[in-house]
Amino acid sequence: MTSLIGNDAARAAFLTAMHGASMHHAWLLAGPEGVGKGSFARAAGAALLAEAAVPGTIGAGFDLPPDNPTRALIAAGSHPDFRLLERLPKDAAKPGENLARSITIAQVRTLQAMFATTPSMSSRRVVLIDAVDDLERSGANALLKSLEEPPAGTIFLLVSHAPGRLLPTIRSRCRLLRFEPLPREAMTALLREALPQAGDDEIAALIAAGQGSPGRALGYAGLEMAALDHALATIAERGDPTNAERSRLAQALALKAAQPRYEAFLDRTPSFVAAEAARREGDRLRTALDAHDAARNLAASARALSLDAQATVFEMAGIVARLATPSPR
C-alpha cells in the first residue's frame, strides 16, 4: 500500500470524521484525475475496516503495517466486507488493458447480495467506486437507491474526476472531500520514489507535464519528456525559420513505434504554450493566448479525426514557432 503524499487537508478531515461520533455514510472524493484520489480511497477503506475490526489500530495516519490482516485480505481481493467497483477489462486474460467503457448496472447489482447480510468481520463494510463518473446511467440510478437508504454499517467512497457531471441526487447524498493538484515538492517526492533511475531533467519535465497530477506524470514515464520539452523550447525561442526542427520532430513522432510519444506530444504542447503565456504580457501575451487556443483545438481535432501524425506534429510545431515572432504593432 503506497504511502500517501499531499492533500493533507483532505486526509485530516477524513480522519477527524472517522474518529468522531458519527461517520457520514457516503463520501465524494473529487478533484483532477491522477492526484491520488484512488490511492487515498483504498487506504481510507482499509483504515475504516481495520479500525472497526480492532479499535485503536489507526493513529495519526492511514498506513497499516504489512502484516495487518485487513490489509492482506484487501490486497488478495478476499475481504468479505470490501467491494471495489471499477471498469473491467474486456479480456480477462489482460487485466488493465482495453477496459470496458463503463461500470455496468450488473456490477452495481452484485452489491445487493452483500447488502442482504450483515458485515462479517466487524460492524462496518466499505464500497469503493473508482470512478463513479464511469457508471452507466442505469447503474447510477441503482447506486442512488443504496445511497438514499444505506445498509447499516456501509461506507461508500466515490472517486470522481468530474463531480459536476454526476446526478445531483448522488452529489447531495455525499459529503464532499476535495483534492487539489499536488505542489512541486510533493510531485518531486512521489516521482523520485517511483522513478529512482530518472535524471533531474526528466523529473522536471514530468512535473511540468503532470501539472500537479502524479498519475498523469507517471503515465509519461519512459517517453523522454525532457527531450520533447527541449524541442518545443528550441522552436519557441528561435522560431524555426527553415522548418528543420519541425520536420525533424514530425518525422520522429510519426513512426509507428513513437505512438505513445505522439500522444504525449498532443497532451504536452498546449500546456507548454499556456506556461509560456503565463510569463508574458501585452502583444506577446495575446500571441501566446492565440497560439494556445490553436494548439488545444488542433490536439482535439487530431484525436477526434485521426489526423495524419506527421502533418499534425509539423502544424503543431508551427503554432509553437509563433511564440518567437513578435506581434505586429
Image: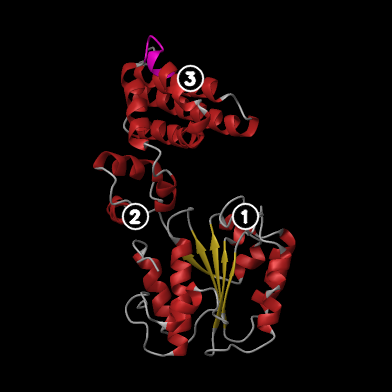
Query: How packed is label 1: few (under 14 Cα within 10 Å), some, or many (20 or more)?
Result: few
The residue at which mark 2 appears reads as 194
Q: Which residues are magenta?
A: 240-246
Inspect the image, locate mark 1, and give the three-letter code of the amino acid beneath it.
Arg
Inspect the image, locate mark 2, and give the three-letter code of the amino acid beneath it.
Ala
Q: Position of residue 263 (x, y in %)?
A: 50, 36
Element under disc 2: helix
Give the quadrant of the C terminus: top left
Inspect the image, locate mark 3, and give the three-letter code of the amino acid beneath it.
Phe
Work out which residue is located at the far front of the displayed protein and give it: 93
Q: Earlier in the sequence, mark 2 or mark 3?
A: 2
Q: Earlier in the sequence, mark 3 or mark 1?
A: 1
Element under disc 3: helix
The residue at which mark 1 appears reads as 165
Q: Earlier in the sequence, mark 2 or mark 1?
A: 1
The residue at which mark 3 appears reads as 314
Give the quadrant of the N terminus: bottom left
The residue shown at (40%, 47%) is 217
Q: Position of residue 35 (x, y in %)?
A: 43, 56
- Callout in the foreground (3, 1): 3
- Find residue 304 and report its image quarter: top right
- Find residue 300 and report its image quarter: top right
> Disc 2 versus disc 3: distance between alpha carbons?
33 Å
